[in-house]
Amino acid sequence: MIYLFDEINTELTVVDKELLKQVDSPDLMITETSRQLIKAGGKRLRPAFSLLSGKFHDFDIEKILPLAVALELIHMATLIHDDVVDAALTRRGKSTVKAQWGNRISTHVGDYLFGKSLILLSSYQDSIIPNVLSNTSVKMCEGEIYQISASYDSQQTIKDYFYRVNRKTALLIAASCQLGAAACGASPDIYMALRRYGHNVGMAFQITDDILDMTAEQECMGKPIGGDLRQGIITLPVILALKNSTHQKRLYQLINKYNKSENEIQEAINIIKKCKGLEMSSNIAYHYIEKAKQQLDYLPDISTKKTLMTIAEFITYRNF
Amino acid sequence: MIYLFDEINTELTVVDKELLKQVDSPDLMITETSRQLIKAGGKRLRPAFSLLSGKFHDFDIEKILPLAVALELIHMATLIHDDVVDAALTRRGKSTVKAQWGNRISTHVGDYLFGKSLILLSSYQDSIIPNVLSNTSVKMCEGEIYQISASYDSQQTIKDYFYRVNRKTALLIAASCQLGAAACGASPDIYMALRRYGHNVGMAFQITDDILDMTAEQECMGKPIGGDLRQGIITLPVILALKNSTHQKRLYQLINKYNKSENEIQEAINIIKKCKGLEMSSNIAYHYIEKAKQQLDYLPDISTKKTLMTIAEFITYRNF
């Protein structure tokens, strides 16, 4: 995806440098764990969206930088908090990143990164940035908690799934697009179009992620296939398959089961694939991409518009 | 301590009502866990300090309310995140509150409460409130992480201990005092005196807590004695005893030991008591109280000044 960010590569380097500077703490453990997280990479999707959106009105890196860095810190905090597990899972999941630092360190380092983002955000005079991001972070938590209480619940609907995906992924990407433009002084008609673009791209992004979790491409990336099924997270392909498969009853059994064997996970994926659960999910992701692209009509004709168009199209084709 | 809050009892009731309103989420699990936390009580010390401080300049409950509620939400978030444990501790500590919800719920509910506090804080135009509280929350995390990395480290100095206690407790109380006055429009000479008062009271408060952890009074409250020793947290009485006791070597052995028996915890406490580790700690707490009271000289002569004086004196005499 990186070549898509060509026009903001210089700025992304500045973001990375600033990220490292932000986590330079007197406490060595904080600095080390955070640096490791930063260097492990990630696509810097949220800073990138904020920078690209800033191009639609008097682009000024100085104005976006605190926001861009804060967005990545919030994202990192979310990732590290998602790694906090319960005892049962710790025992099973020794090989994952979760086991690297303890739960207590993960919790407090996550809080630390989130706190750092707040210091950056408090430099903005305009209240839209803290307003949007505080509301976003509350809703993201609601999504995470809902995901926990909805795990292994095979009764959930597509609507429940969209609620979760919006909170888990789309809201922060929507905020990144909206606030990058707002930070540069864009008017509401511009930044709200960008927000809607971000929302739709974010929904497509997470649906694609959930599809990739069941495909071989995922395995090529070194991640085990069927991670969501293993954790009891019910995603769109599962919900669609439970509605449409001729092996509905067996799929229910498999989904509801704790501690599935590798064979059972493979069997569930096969059922989902057979009834075209993945294709149907792809179509829904594609529908969101179309909606994202439509929002671009409301934006001035600058070259960045083409970039946003290409990024939207790329989302559903990616295999990472 | 409650009678000390007589002059703000009405406002504290409003704070409690607003707290319950804030955690009213569409997600039942969030609402229930948060309500349980709120109803479990706590002294509402931070809201109370902010309200009392507001009395020193054009007191207006409307102006302080979002801050007062946010302070308690931040405190609650800290408490719930402190309850996140690693697998080893989960197994040992089944009987504590930690086991009630899982780690994952604790982490996300803590984030949720913290996020809710940010929404409240983003209503303030003046940047001092978000500025001070974002910096405070970062430093509080540093303190928590330092406490984890310093556990079972019997080499730590009094200075290390003060660093931790400031971050763990004093900073948020200092901020409560400072910002209550600032929210009502007080000038820096007023709110900085209140901040220094809060800092010193906060230090004394935590030192007293650490003393109580080793005394019978603590046991009367239904908490097991020696909780800090059990968790490897080295507090002031221990540091002083390691310097002064004639049973230094034995105390080192006991402190450094993981999974201490009840007899070993009692033996350590006896050594600490014998060399007057608790009295010396009390004297240091008392010294902070004196410093807190001195700060009151900088404040206008209103009846609340007397209340703050009494609260400061009460801190070291309390047995809960």
Image: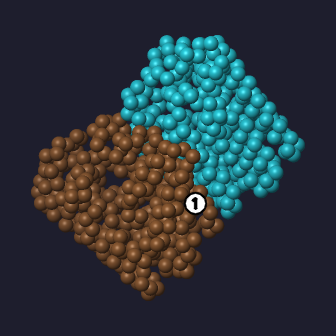
Chain colours: A cyan, B brown
Q: Quadrant for the C terminus of chain A, please.
A: top right
Image quadrant of residue A118?
bottom right
Left or right: where A171 falls relative to B180 = right
Query: According to the image, label 1 marks what residue?
Result: B120
Say above or below: A118 vs A209: below
Subunit under mark 1: B
Type of amino acid at the residue the image marks with label 1: Leu
- Which residue is painted at 54% across and 67% down in the image? B65
Q: Residues within 10 Å of mark 1 (few under 14, many from 20)?
A: many
Instruction: Check disc 1 and report its element: helix, strand or loop.
Output: helix
Say above or below: B224 vs A243: below
Image quadrant of residue A251?
top right
Where is residue A232? Give x, y as percent: 51, 27
Where is residue B306? Give x, y as percent: 38, 82
Report the front residue among A7 and B1.
B1
- Which residue is painted at 41% across and 35% down in the image? A86
Say above or below: B253 vs A128: above
The single residue placed furthest to the right in the displayed view is: A301
Where is residue B231? Give x, y as percent: 28, 46
Could one spot residue A277 in this view of the protein? Answer: yes
Report the front residue among B75 and A2.
B75
- Which residue is painted at 43% across and 27% down in the image? A93
Image quadrant of residue A147?
top right
